[in-house]
């Protein structure tokens, strides 16, 4: 049984978090329609060697800003810029030195932003399928991205426009899992987390523009980075992953066989194995340098 060290709400950002395990510090950040609870299986698997902290981003389920009646008057707007600054403040407040940062999908852009602008906070960065194409420079790739983004998000936007928020949740998860009925086929606890975060979909669709990370900035990143993606993932993610990997020849590019965008949720053990392999290589490299 996993021993939870602490559950709490960060006093600076209002973000809930859960800590477990012992060892080097790692911060786990969820994607869209999720919160810190999605990482519970991963934290249990990593607990013997790593001290993990799973955070819930501002505006997501359980955070101070999730409830409009509790929301602070000075709350920053929903978007990657806000979440990146929250993560930086949270990591600084941990007082454990540089951390391994793990981010999936929506939050991966924030992680790469920190790698570019706050590298002193990080020992390494592992991103799985970032989704913002600010560093995609190839015109044909951008066209492919745009066409698939329309296929993925267009039906969800139509559902929102008609007031069908539960339908929008289902459509987004079906699109992410790449088949009709994916949402309903998931285990009950995953569906519940997604429903609990349904209120974030309108915020996602109207969010502030993400920080414009460039390919040149990624090339200058000095902390170890792994860009991971599923071999079967859809173009809206693969285009961005391939561009990130191309821009960072110094990074590891992991392509997971038989996987798509939902791999972290579907295969926690395999995901954790990939994390540990990456982290252990970083540890060996640091010892060699010393």
Image (cartoon, rainbow, N blue to C red):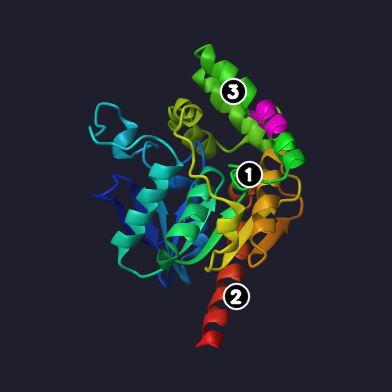
Left or right of 51 on screen, residue 248: right
Where's the N terminus, which quadrant?
A: bottom left
- Residue 76 seen: yes
Element at badge 2? Answer: helix
Q: Residue at x 68, y 51 (%)?
A: 243
The disc at residue 156 is 3
Q: Which mark is residue 262?
A: 1
Q: Is residue 31 above or below residue 223?
A: above
Q: Which residue is mark 2?
A: 281
Given contact means CB atoms under 8 Å apart, are the residues at marks 2 and 3 in contact?
Answer: no
Q: Is residue 148 magenta?
A: yes
Q: Which callout, 1 or 2, points to the residue nearer the camera?
A: 2
Which circle's residue, 2 or 3, is located before the other in the chain? 3
Compare residues 142 and 233 and report the one nearer the observer.
142
Q: Earlier in the sequence, mark 3 or mark 1?
A: 3
Cα distance, mark 2 to mark 3? 40 Å
Q: Which residues are magenta?
A: 146-152
Q: Nearer the viewer, residue 227 or 274?
A: 227
Name the residue: 61% across, 64% down.
273
Where residue 103 sits: x, y (%)? 52, 52
- Residue 73 lies in the magenta stretch: no
Disc nearest the viewer among 3 and 1: 3
Locate residue 133 relative to residue 38 in the image: left or right: right
């Amino acid at each position: 049984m996993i021993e939870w060290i602490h559950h709490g709400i960060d006093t600076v950002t209002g973000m809930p978090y859960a800590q477990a395990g012992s060892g080097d510090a790692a911060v786990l950040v969820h994607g869209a329609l999720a919160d810190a609870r999605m990482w519970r299986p991963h934290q249990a698997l990593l607990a013997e060697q790593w001290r993990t902290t799973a955070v819930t981003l501002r505006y997501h389920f359980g955070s101070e800003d999730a409830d409009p009646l509790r929301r602070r008057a000075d709350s920053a707007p929903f978007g990657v810029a806000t979440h990146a600054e929250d993560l930086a403040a949270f990591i600084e407040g941990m007082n454990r030195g540089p951390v391994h940062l793990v981010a999936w999908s929506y939050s991966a852009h924030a992680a790469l932003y920190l790698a570019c602008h706050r590298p002193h906070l990080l020992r390494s960065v592992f991103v799985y399928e970032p989704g913002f194409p600010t560093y995609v420079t190839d015109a044909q790739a951008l066209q492919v991205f745009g066409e698939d983004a329309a296929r993925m998000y267009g039906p969800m936007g139509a559902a929102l426009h008609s007031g069908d928020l539960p339908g929008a949740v289902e459509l987004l998860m079906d699109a992410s899992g790449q088949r009709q009925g994916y949402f309903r086929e998931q285990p009950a606890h995953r569906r519940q987390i997604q429903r609990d975060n349904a209120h974030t979909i309108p915020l996602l669709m109207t969010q502030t523009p993400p920080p414009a990370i460039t390919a040149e900035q990624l090339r200058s990143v000095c902390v170890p980075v792994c860009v991971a993606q599923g071999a079967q993932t859809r173009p809206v993610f693969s285009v961005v992953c391939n561009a990130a990997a191309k821009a960072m020849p110094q990074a590891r590019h992991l392509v997971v066989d038989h996987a798509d965008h939902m791999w972290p949720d579907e295969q926690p053990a395999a995901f954790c194995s990939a994390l540990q392999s990456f982290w252990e290589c970083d540890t060996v490299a640091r010892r060699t340098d010393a």
